[in-house]
Image (cartoon, grey):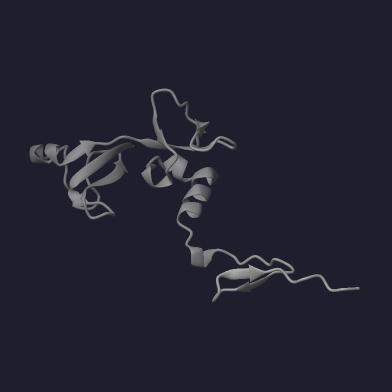
Amino acid sequence: MRPYVCYNCLNAKGTPGRQFIAAQPICPTCGADRVNDPKAKHVILDGKLIHFEGPHAIIREKGCGKLACGLQMANRQFSGDPDAVNCPKCKASPEWIERHKAKHTSVDELQEFDVPNVEIDPNAEQYKTPKPEAE
């Protein structure tokens, strides 16, 4: 299985260049066949396999130094952005799933935290800490 890009199809952003992984350069969406149709050689191009490198535990904006699929990093292309990754093994890893879920979680899906002794007034956009009761 190898990565390919079909420029006859649109990607999720609506621009030409739909990525797919297949044994042969035949687009599963439109059926363009680079093997049997010489005109399709300009439509289906070899793609790059982009692997996922998780974030460093302490240093911001740095990777952890290993790929989620377990391959060696030498001579590989990788990214910390889960949306850029197209390696199927990386996308099946817990690291990628967690990072993808965190990136695509909306504010509405976040849980409310129960903070004791704090009153929140959303209209005033402020919070109040009650004064301790006198003994």
Q: Which residue is rendered at x = 26% and y = 51% of the image?
A: 11
| Closest to the observer, 58 or 50 | 58
Residue 53 point in image, percent of width and height: 47, 36
Residue 19 point in image, percent of width and height: 28, 45
Q: Which residue is rendered at x = 25% and y = 38% of the image?
A: 24
| Closest to the observer, 121 or 84 | 121
Residue 9 point in image, percent of width and height: 19, 51
Asked if residue 102 is positioned above or below residue 57 in the image, the reply reads: below
Q: Residue most toward the right?
A: 135
Figure disc tally: 0
Asked if residue 104 is positioned above or below residue 76 in the image, the reply reads: below
Residue 120 lies in quadrant: bottom right
Residue 112 point in image, percent of width and height: 61, 67
Q: Residue most toward the top?
A: 74
Q: 28 left or right of 87?
A: left
Q: Residue most toward the left?
A: 39
Q: Which residue is rendered at x = 74% and y = 71% of the image?
A: 130
Asked if residue 116 is positioned above or below residue 19 in the image, the reply reads: below
- Position of the C terminus by quadrant: bottom right
Q: 117 left or right of 49?
A: right
Q: Which residue is rendered at x = 77% and y = 71% of the image?
A: 131
- Position of the N terminus by quadrant: top left
